[in-house]
Image (spheres, rainbow, N blue to C red):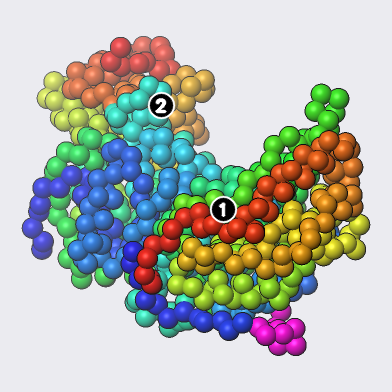
Amino acid sequence: MQAFDYKYQQLEPVKSFKRVPGPEMYVPGHRTCAGCGPALNYRLVAKAAGKDTIFIGPTGCMYVANASYLCTPYAVSWIHAQITNGGAVASGIEAAFKVAMRKGRHAGPFPNIIVMAGDGGTVDIGLQAMSALMYRNHKVLFICYDNESYANTGIQTSPTTPYGAATTFTPPGKEIPEGKVLFPKNPPQLVIGGHPAVKYVATTTIAHPLDLMNKVRKALSQPGPTFMHMLAPCPKGWLFDEKMTREMARLAVETGMWSMYEWENGVYKYTNVPKKYKPVGEYMKHQGRFAHLKPEHIAKMQAFVDEKIKAVSQPIPVAAAVPGKQ
Amino acid sequence: MAKAKLLTGCRAAAEGAKAAEVEVICSYPIRPYTAIMMELAKMVANGELNAEFVHGEGEHAQLSVVLGACAAGARAYTGSSGVGVTYAMEIYSPMAGGRYPVQMSIADRTLDPPGDFGSEHTDAMSTRDQGWLLGWACSPQEVYDNTLIAYRVGEDHRVMLPQMVCQDGYFISHIPDTVTLGEQSQVKEFLPPYRPIGPLSLTHPVSHGPQIRPDQGAPMDAQRAQTFLAVPKVIEEATADFNRIFGRSYDPFVEQYKLEDAEIAFFIQGAHSNTARSAVDRLRKQGVKAGMARLRWVRPWPTHQLAAALGHVKAVGVIETSTSYGGAMRGGNLIHELRASLYDLDDRPLVTSFMGGLGGETMWPADFDHIAKILTQAVTEKKVRNYVQWLGM
């Protein structure tokens, strides 16, 4: 694999909240809902990345509710991509900056190129472009801000919508009492499992801001493609009190619905692992999207989570990393 | 002056892209345009061309990659054929609406089904309402030339639009013909470096492609329509400069072959015009006053130039190498726009059309004799019997 020999940034970890960079790169001017998880997510990512950044925003909530003509919330360069092609547009931008640096048109540093895609733009209609970006070894951070539905179009199911959730495409009814009957895709495992160019993958949530920012900074300091999966609860789609956005993300971790980890060169490092997991019902009871579920459905969800968190206690690399440094 | 070489249309396109010093290339294989990318891949691998060669995962990605590259200030290049062209359909309007002057080189191929490698223009013609510049070459030489002319026009700040440079699959893409490549000094004089407007930048942050309100839509659409009104002048300037610098003699919009005193004329674009041209010569020897108008740009459509070129002719036969099933004239596309172009003339020619070369079938000299016979009959009868006739049945 060709080495990445362009000058790029090394972003030091932020040691404490007091040392979080001051400048905001995602500023007022957007029209997101009260308590919007993805908006908070965007703000933290932009703050962590800083001014030398270019965002690619595939269609989704963070396009439709953010980037309005003559009123944009981005203090850094931003480009809309179709919901289908965030990974491909980012690839082209990265390639252009390589040539610009080779020809001396751009002195450097190599920009932090970040795709901020929703779950549909990452593992559904955007999967092909995301996977190709990861395969082709572009120096791009692809972030999936996961609000677990096509929220902007009115809360339709996506591949990360959890089992049992009511959405406008999975309404619970007499024939289908659970609403959603399928279990969700696992975005970071899709990346880790089949993309040898990728050396760093991490998960986090908007309830863990310092962790989130430091993982972003670490990802951006890599010479190749990186992937992050961020839980960004959606009050409108999940039907919880908008005051509880962060609480929802925290409960997701405490119940095992969400795991916090880094995967670096084939090695997993889990953090925020509860000593004792709370039952999933503690998470689900706050959310109207699960209100219709019967005890047997919640038991089914618990069994799914129990199986999933086994991996946390026994981390096994799913894919051997390519030996040697880049 | 550089020496003429024998090159295929694909090789000529690649040589044009190399001469233009394209910076980001995105490939995906599909016949027959693939050979363009094979040539460019070699040039990049050999260090002859300082470009990033990105292996797109499909045509949709090809267009998306070059969109991103162009937005970041690079001269970007891609291409496709047949169903590859239509697979990328979503990205044509963001490209044109975003005013990203990338170039897409197309070697035409039929659309499925059934699978067929032959040339048909429906692939690129399907994109004609997406806001791109669109035109056909009729020889490998013209493919090379159009590559440079299209970049010059598309990147002009009065234009800033993506371009499709089309050639017939196989007839042009794979049959070698003499091509004179320009000297790099000529290319430099003709084609300035790409100067992007408001590219993605770290020092001057910009937002590309935000949402608008419905009431903001019409003014933006009107602005694009205004732009297209300005394109012909830029094409004229670019073609004049090209002719002067490279010693060619292109008409900017319509090749007019023996039209001055013609009573019947073929109206055509692409490879089969070469057969049409020789048919004109043969018919003239037989005493038939035939001529040919060959279209070089479909977008912008040269309405007034066609009225001027064909207004005096008694009957025009449109040769259609693309389909528009269920359309007003029941056959192809070009006849609609040609008839519309001639409509305001007081004394307009009779116009009928002929579906020819479909599926990649050759158009034979006899086909043009047949067309001439029908046109002569129309002149005698002072009317056309049919909107369309299918050749090669």
Q: Of helix, strand and loop, which one carries label 2?
A: loop
Amino acid, disc 1: Gln
| Element at label 1 | helix
Q: In this picture, which residue range is highlighted in magenta?
A: A14-24
Gap in angstroms between the C-alphas marked 1 and 2 = 36 Å
Crowding at label 1, few (<14), some or many (≥20) Cα neighbours within 10 Å?
few
Q: Which residue lies furthest to the left in this view?
A: B3
Q: Mark 1 points at which residue?
A: A189
Answer whether residue B383 is visible to the viewer in this image.
Answer: no
Q: Horizontal placement of B112 versus A253: left or right? A: left
Q: Which residue is drawn at 26% across and 56% down?
A: B41
Which residue is labeled 2 in the image?
Answer: B112
Please tell me how crowded label 2 is: few (under 14), some (14-19), or many (20+) other residues with Cα within 10 Å.
Answer: few
Q: Left or right of A166: which side holds B324? A: left
Residue shown at the point (51%, 58%) measured from the top left: A317
Image position, residue B321 (x, y; %): 35, 28
Foreground pick, B125 / A82: A82
Q: Where does the image place residue B199, in percent across and percent down from the top left?
A: 51, 70
From the image, which quarter does the C terminus of chain A lie in? Answer: bottom left
Tell me what residue is drawn at x 55 percent, y 71 percent. A219
Dominant SS of magenta comes to loop
Quarter holding the N terminus of chain A? bottom left
